[in-house]
Amino acid sequence: MVRPEELKYDERGLLPCIVQDAATGEVLTLAWQSREALEQTLGSGSATFWSRSRKQIWVKGATSGNTQAVRSLRADCDHDAVLVRVTPAGPACHTGARSCFFEAVEGAPDSPEAPGETLARLESVLRDRRAHPPSGSYTAKLYADENLRHKKIGEEATELVMASLRGDTDAVASEAADVLYHLLVLLQPHGLSLQDVTAKLREREGKRRG
């Protein structure tokens, strides 16, 4: 474990700070922290940085409301950069984009986003549908009918098994997507999230199952 005083700041007294979504692993932004900004982050639990243009400390979301609640803070092996894992309350970028890293560089490969990012974004949309059910929404209909939620999980799981038995890989992927969607819907009324499920998976790592 690294003590804050062991971190190595550059000649300007700054430390590069990579901000990552704790739920998805998506890199949200690259910011800078002074010693005071780091101490304020540790003390408040809110991501706090040093603005090189304004030459002052700023709390992410102080004016926009797009705050970032800190879940962990780790130093790299050289102690001259930090990784801050956060739960964002809105976009990270001033443009309104989820992440500041949204423009592909010409000539470079551009792979699709990580599965965790897609699932976490879907979970966020489903949470909003539950809180603010739009008229005619299928998701809202599921939240309003507990029996339907359970029925659909059974139906979609059966369809997934049948597609697998047929060896239809495209149908398997499609039915698996349906199962995941309905599973995320089912979790929320129980106060559960993807993080609760992945925590159970982590508990099982390295354990021999009989």
Image (tube, helix red, strand yellow):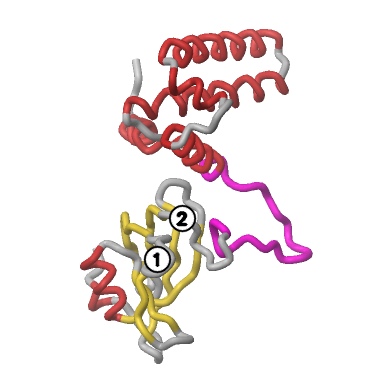
Q: Amino acid at mark 2?
A: Gly
Magenta includes 104? yes
Labelled pair 1, 2 in contact (Cβ < 8 Å): yes
> Looking at this view, is 197 or 123 the one in front?
123
The answer to which quarter of the image holds residue 108 is bottom right
Determine crowd level at label 2: few under 14, some 14-19, many 20+ residues with C-alpha closer than 10 A: some
Q: Amino acid at mark 1?
A: Gly
> Looking at this view, is 131 or 187 the one in front?
131
Q: Which residue is mark 1?
A: 61
Give the residue at the far front of this rendering. Answer: 135
Q: Which residues are magenta?
A: 97-117
Going by the image, does 41 lie left or right of 136?
A: left
Residue 76 visible, this angle = no
Helix, strand or loop status at disc 2: loop
Helix, strand or loop status at disc 1: loop
Going by the image, does 27 lie left or right of 35?
A: right
Q: Is residue 13 above or below residue 45?
A: below
